[in-house]
Amino acid sequence: MNALEPIKAAPLYAKRTAVFPKKTDGPFRRFKWLVMAVCLAIYWGTPWLRWDRGPYAPNQAVLVDLAHRRFYMFAIEIWPQEFYFVAGMLIMAGIGLFLVTSAVGRAWCGYACPQTVWTDLYQHVDRLIDGDRNAQLRLQAAPWRAAKIVRRAFKWSVYLGIAFVTGGAWIFYFADAPTLQREFWTGTAAPVAYACTGILTFTTFWLGGFMREQVCIYMCPWPRIQTAMLDENSLIVTYKDWRGEPRGSLKEAKGAATPLGDCIDCKQCVAVCPTGIDIREGAQIGCITCALCIDACDKAMASVGRPRGLIDYCTLVDADLETKGLPARSALKVLLRPRMIAYFTIWGGIGLALLFMLGARERLTLSVARERNPEFVQLSGGAVRNAFTVNLRNMQDRPRTLRIAAEGLGGVSLYSDEMAPTEARGEIAVTVPADSTRHVRLYAVVPGDHARSQDFTLVARATDREGGAVRRETQFMAPETEHEHEESE
Ligand code: SF4
Ligand code: SF4
């Protein structure tokens, strides 16, 4: 098969053949261990990080507070009406994946995808309990006797324990982790916490422990999307058939009429592959580019004194150059191409725009709704009263006192539903608790001789040292004066 052939699609359905990848070692394997440890540590440890936001907000560094409709991420607090920040971050994550895929192919699949991380972890458990590939194959073929049942029961219990401790830990992102953990073990947590833990434990156990490469090949849409994003300049794991073919064992090479290629047909690349494919058949959708076959093949090459890199990361353009006996391009030249620069510019532009919006966003907001039924009330002395519902949102982590006034409305007095009408005055003070919205029913009373329908501005000014003011245009409604009535006729 030729490495330059297009990536082969997987059939839509195939009966599963269990894969028992052999243990290997090498730079890519060690890098995978490191990525797994970092990913699991970040995932598991993040809910336990604390971040001081003062006495009025939770101190969990990363928290999706569904009850209060807030998303906290270190110094950033996102309110529901600011969901565009989350949308922006998701778009950045999407473009970041385009960028990475375009540069180094399916690196996400091979190293950081949760399915890869958990499958890798469970395969390591298999090796610890059942032994390496050959021992696993023997046990798989053995009849279901007591020893096999006990071993399987023990291994699946370990799977379940890992699934519970890791997969189930997702719930700690949605509540204060130490409190939820205490409540969980004392049986006082919300039923939804137990239900989510059960579902997440089961899905981790099933997908990582049993479905494994089937998820990558058949269930996940990402391989199909990624193959559309790859181009001839993307790095993919490639078997250099121009160097390896015709393949043959050392014994076959001795008796061959013409010299064979570098591939000694040891099949180590197939034995270590976590998806069970043979990369020598060309690029295929089952390859998650984990690079373990590179480690295995480099070891095989070292054992026969041939140069490493028979299987290696390589772009199609460089594969073509090498086939013609020309040197491959430098990594910098491969990375610095217009498509990569365009992705990076868009990604960075969105990031900068989000940062700017984050810095410039209003921490105090005001909205006003005028009561329309009735639009006004004429009081006994001739004065006219309008009612408004005012929403004051304080997005800071401390209470703020605001003075509300009506600009452009001559002779107006204001009072709220917490005051007696006799306490009405030109400005009223309202305190909004930290990190919350306060709804105030506000009455504006204008003496009869000033009362006419007109626009005015409601202003809320902070009285603290930080200061600041928010304004909203609204309308005051009054009965038509005789003059207005005549004009309208
Ligand atoms: S072919 Fe190689 S890179 Fe691809 S999944 Fe198998 S071991 Fe990983
Ligand atoms: S590990 Fe290398 S030498 Fe061995 S079969 Fe695979 S490609 Fe050939």
Image (tube, rainbow, N blue to C red):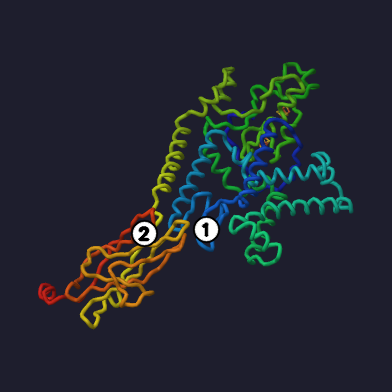
In screen coordinates, is 147 left or right of 158?
right
Q: Is residue 150 visible?
A: yes
Looking at this view, is 133 or 127 the one in front?
127
Q: Hey, which quadrant is residue 103 in on the image?
A: top right
Q: Hey, which quadrant is residue 239 in on the image?
A: top right
**Whole-percent x and y of residue 145?**
89, 53
Query: The residue under label 2 is which amino acid type?
Result: Thr
Looking at this view, is 201 or 104 the one in front?
201
Q: Residues within 10 Å of mark 1 (few under 14, many from 20)?
A: some
Query: The residue under label 1 is which amino acid type?
Result: Ala
2 or 1: mark nearer the eye: 2
Q: What is the CA distance from the residue labelled 2 to the residue labelled 1? A: 22 Å
Residue hosting label 1: 57
User: Which residue lies at the image location 75% right of the left edge and 19% below the top edge?
Assistant: 305
Secondary element type, mark 2: loop
User: Which residue lies at the image location 26% right of the left edge and 75% below the top edge?
Assistant: 385
Q: Residues within 10 Å of mark 2 (few under 14, many from 20)?
A: some
Q: Is residue 217 visible?
A: no
Up the image or down, 166 lies above or below 233; here it is below
Ligand 1 within 8 Å of the CB at mark 2: no
Say which quadrant the N terminus sits in. top right
* N-term-proximal mark, 2 vs 1: 1
User: Which residue lies at the image location 72% right of the left edge and 19% below the top edge?
Assistant: 306
User: Which residue lies at the image location 44% right of the left edge and 44% below the top edge?
Assistant: 355
**Whole-percent x and y of residue 87?**
47, 51
In screen coordinates, is 214 left or right of 395?
right
Quadrant of the rendered image holding ligand 1: top right
Say which quadrant the C terminus sits in. bottom left
Residue found at the far bottom of this picture: 380
**Whole-percent x and y of residue 117?**
67, 44
Residue hosting label 2: 463
